[in-house]
Image: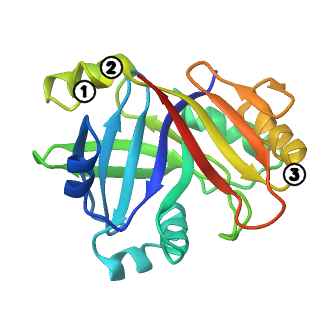
Amino acid sequence: MMELDHVVYFTKKSPEVHVQNHPGTTVGGRHKNWGTMNALTYTKNSYIEYLSVEYLEVAKSANHPLTNLLLNDLENGEGWGTICFRTGDLQLLNERLLREGWKTSGILDAERETSSGFIRKWKMLFIEQKVSEELPYPFFIEWDEPFDMRMKRLRQDGTLKPYNEKLQISKCEFAVQDPDHDVREWGKLLNAAISEHTIGLVNTELVFKKVNHGKERLVNVEILE
């Protein structure tokens, strides 16, 4: 079953500022190919990514789905941007989505250089979608090491502290104009059961709330301590 991997907050602040302002947050590192950088707040089974632009010209030329959304949304200020789910077999997921008629980015390689110089690698998959005021589809990730091993490594390097392992992202709320449509579409995309305007996953709950106008986005993330 699909699990929440992380939620993304688009920010104009440096990672160091978020480390100061949010308990349990660490500097993530740099995505050199995308011109971006981040800070991370881990929970026991997911995390918050504070994503910002480091080199604007690199970000503009990267033509990466997440970077394109970041640049677009930051024009109107900071805020929640999108959400990512993890899977153990991205190739299998991509094949299913293509069979069902979705258009995807294909599997993309990605990496981040941490503050210690360690290169963390993963693979990503996006649903093709023009950036607009419509709700962005989630994207998907497959890490280069099993979840338990990755958590162990994060404990060893001090990123995942006892405080962080008490936290859990319990609910992610989306403001949309047609909750009925979006919850059905996301339920199909995630291959998950729906209940009214809610999708229940192993480690969080997705709730779609109606708004009459304006940009459709992730608007609230609830964290249990």
Q: Please, is residue 117 above or below residue 76 in the view?
A: above
Whether residues under marks 2 and 1 lie with C-beta atoms below 8 angstroms apart, the answer is: yes
Disc ID at residue 188: none
Question: Residue 128 at x, y = what percent?
Answer: 68, 60
Q: Please, is residue 142 above or below residue 128 in the view?
A: above
Question: Residue 186 at x, y = what percent?
Answer: 76, 40
Task: Classify mark 2: residues with Cα within 10 Å, few (<14), some (14-19) or many (20+).
Answer: some
Q: Mark 3 belongs to which amino acid?
A: Asp
Q: Mark 1 belongs to which amino acid?
A: Leu
- Secondary structure at badge 1 equals loop
- Give the residue drawn at x 24%, y 27%: 160
Whether residues under marks 1 and 3 lie with C-beta atoms below 8 angstroms apart, the answer is: no
Disc ID at residue 165: 2
Disc ID at residue 160: 1
What residue is disc 3 on?
Answer: 178
Q: Of the residues under marks 3 and 2, which one precedes in the sequence?
A: 2
- Give the residue drawn at x 74%, y 29%: 199
Q: Mark 2 belongs to which amino acid?
A: Glu
Outermost residue toward the bottom in this view: 57
Q: Please, is residue 47 above or below residue 202 in the view?
A: below
Task: Classify mark 1: residues with Cα within 10 Å, few (<14), some (14-19) or many (20+).
Answer: many
Give left or right: position of 50 versus 32.
Answer: right
Whether residues under marks 3 and 2 lie with C-beta atoms below 8 angstroms apart, the answer is: no
